[in-house]
């Protein structure tokens, strides 16, 4: 299952949310989110972070 770090959420908050749902992180992906300015320049707006979670065994 994939978990994305939401805009107003810290990485720690996302990891806690995963744990509450019974998942542990096994992979982390980061990709930049770009924005194009009016003058045509492209700038990095933010990093999008996503975790892949594996169901924990009880």
Image: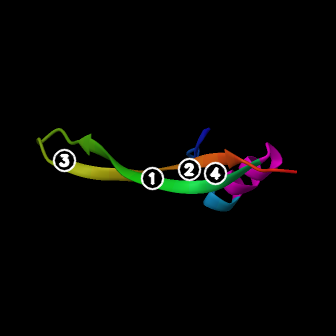
Question: In the rendered structure, which disc, 3 or 1, sits on the residue that comes first in sequence?
Answer: 1
Question: Which of 19 and 36 lies nearest the eye of the viewer?
Answer: 19
Q: Residue at x 88, y 51 (%)?
A: 58
User: Label 2 crowding class (10 Å Cα cut-off): few <14, some 14-19, many 20+?
Assistant: many
Question: In the rendered structure, which disc, 4 or 3, sits on the residue that comes first in sequence?
Answer: 4
Which residue corresponds to mark 1?
Answer: 29
Which residue corresponds to mark 4?
Answer: 9
* Main secondary structure found in the magenta portion: helix
Work out how far the residue at label 1 is from the one at label 4, CA to CA, in angstroms.
Answer: 16 Å
Secondary structure of residue under mark 1: strand
Question: Which of 15 and 13 lies nearest the eye of the viewer?
Answer: 15
Work out how far the residue at label 4 is from the one at label 2, CA to CA, in angstroms.
Answer: 14 Å
Q: Is residue 53 above or below residue 13?
A: above
Please identify, in this view, whether the residue under mark 2 or under mark 3 is nearer the observer: 2
Please identify, in this view, whether the residue under mark 3 or under mark 1 is nearer the observer: 1
Which residue corresponds to mark 2?
Answer: 51
């Amino acid at each position: 299952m994939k978990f994305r770090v939401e805009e107003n959420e810290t990485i720690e908050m996302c990891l806690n949310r995963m744990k509450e749902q019974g998942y542990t992180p096994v992979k982390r992906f980061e990709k930049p989110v770009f924005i194009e300015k009016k003058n045509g320049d492209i700038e990095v707006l933010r990093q999008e972070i996503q975790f892949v979670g594996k169901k924990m065994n009880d």
